[in-house]
Amino acid sequence: MDIHAALAYLDGRANYAKSGRIDAPSLDRIETLCAAMGDPQHAAPVIHVTGTNGKGSTVQMIAGLLQAQGLTVGTYTSPHLERINERITRNGEEISDDDLAEQIAAIADLEVVLGIEPSYFEIVTAAAFRWFADVAVDALVVEVGLLGRWDATNVVDATVAVVTNIGLDHTEFAGPTLEHIAREKAGIIKPRSAAIIGETRPELVEIFREAGGATTLVRGDDFDVIANSLAVSGRLVDLRTPTTIYPDVFVPLNGWHQGQNAAVALAAAETFFAAPIADDVVTEGFAEVRVPGRFEILGRQPLVVIDAAHNPAGADVAAQVFFDDFQPEGRRLLVVGTLRAPEDMLAALRADEFDIVFAATAPSPRGILAADVAAAARALGCDNVVSFDTVEDACRRAVDYADGDDAILATGSLYTAGAARPVLQSLTT
């Protein structure tokens, strides 16, 4: 099986991430697969990360800190921005096409032998664990795909279980309240886990305290950001952990929220090592962090930014960073495509504060039609709205329209950011 056959096989197992199909919650298939492979998910200690927003950035920060300490780190994230290989990395290097195809072929063979039909996400998760065992990593940093309790990644037994925050998202699986969502995310906390909780609302924190972890550390009580200021190409933060204050840490990611993610990541890494981390290791670990698609700047004249905000909470943060941190002086252009109610997303993005909205259909079977996104923008009070069948066409038109002082934000879903990234890079370099 080559990479093309492997990807075709995966497409034939499309799950919710591609089609919106909802399976009954169960870990049976992934547990069966992993058991048949000798449970590779237990080959190295795991830091397991969930939360409504900030998971991807926090995972990359934790991995950077572990690597700076000298460990070989396997990282598993989802979904991908442009190519599936992004999901599975060793010390930041993506799995090769040949290795990915080999791992997926092994899962395909097991599917026949075991008589099961795993989902897209279960196959990729099992392939990742198998590869990490093959290449012998010292630690795994694993991002939850959906909620936590029934996520395929939850076959791990986390040494450190991390919750970034809680918001109303994926309510088709859990809800309708934040408490329901918190209980599902608390499912990654195992009896031997040290729980690192970035959420601060007392009623939600109590749910995580009751989850049965070995210890629980909470942002605001046990660790925190004690200073968080805008810096060139990132944030300059002072971080407090249970053992140490780390001053003047540069985080090369845009947005005040990245300071909170950094506090969570540092607390998780320090807990993993059960010791303070040297200042030079902290500096190196954060300095190397790169998270494509998370308020990523692709051009300066005009300012061109993509962000993978996929829910109203994330969209609100993207708007705050765009308007308040960058304060664009020229016209403000919004390229937007989304998979959820456009009214909520556009309101959170402050679409009525943009000079023109380029509505597009996000490249997913669940993408809201551009005409419906445009109609929602007009209903919100946007005066200048145009629609395009594809994100790529919307991006090309926005760049053609923009002058050097203008600013373009392309956002609304990870699918939108993924489609926008290559075309905007080609037009702005």
Image (cartoon, rainbow, N blue to C red):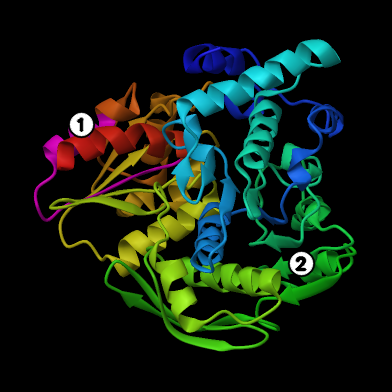
Q: Is residue 157 among what the camera can see?
A: yes
Are dots 2 and 1 in contact, CB under 8 Å?
no
Based on the picture, tell me whether residue 301 belongs to the magenta stretch: no
- Front one among 148 and 165: 148
Q: Secondary structure at mark 1?
A: helix
Q: Amino acid at mark 1?
A: Arg
Q: Could you tell me which residue is drawn at 79 percent across and 53 percent down?
A: 188
Does residue 393 appear to the left or right of 309 in the view shown?
left
Based on the picture, tell me whether residue 410 belongs to the magenta stretch: yes
The magenta region covers 394-412
Q: Secondary structure at mark 2?
A: strand
Q: Toward which corner of the image does residue 383 lie, by quadrant?
A: top left
Q: Quadrant of the C terminus?
A: top left
Q: Toward which corner of the image does residue 182 lie, by quadrant?
A: bottom right
- Front one among 7 and 131: 131
Q: Could you tell me which residue is drawn at 87 percent across and 62 percent down?
A: 211
Q: Quadrant of the N terminus?
A: top right
Which residue is tagged 1? 396
Give the residue at the far left of this rendering.
404
Using a 10 Å C-alpha cutoff, classify the residue at mark 1 as few (fewer than 14 neighbours), some (14 to 19) or many (20 or more): some
Which residue is tagged 2? 195
Q: Earlier in the sequence, mark 2 or mark 1?
A: 2
Q: Could you tell me which residue is drawn at 68 percent across and 26 percent down?
A: 123
Q: Vertically, is 42 above or below 183?
A: above
Instruction: Point out residue 12 in the picture as x, y percentages from the top left corner.
Output: 62, 12
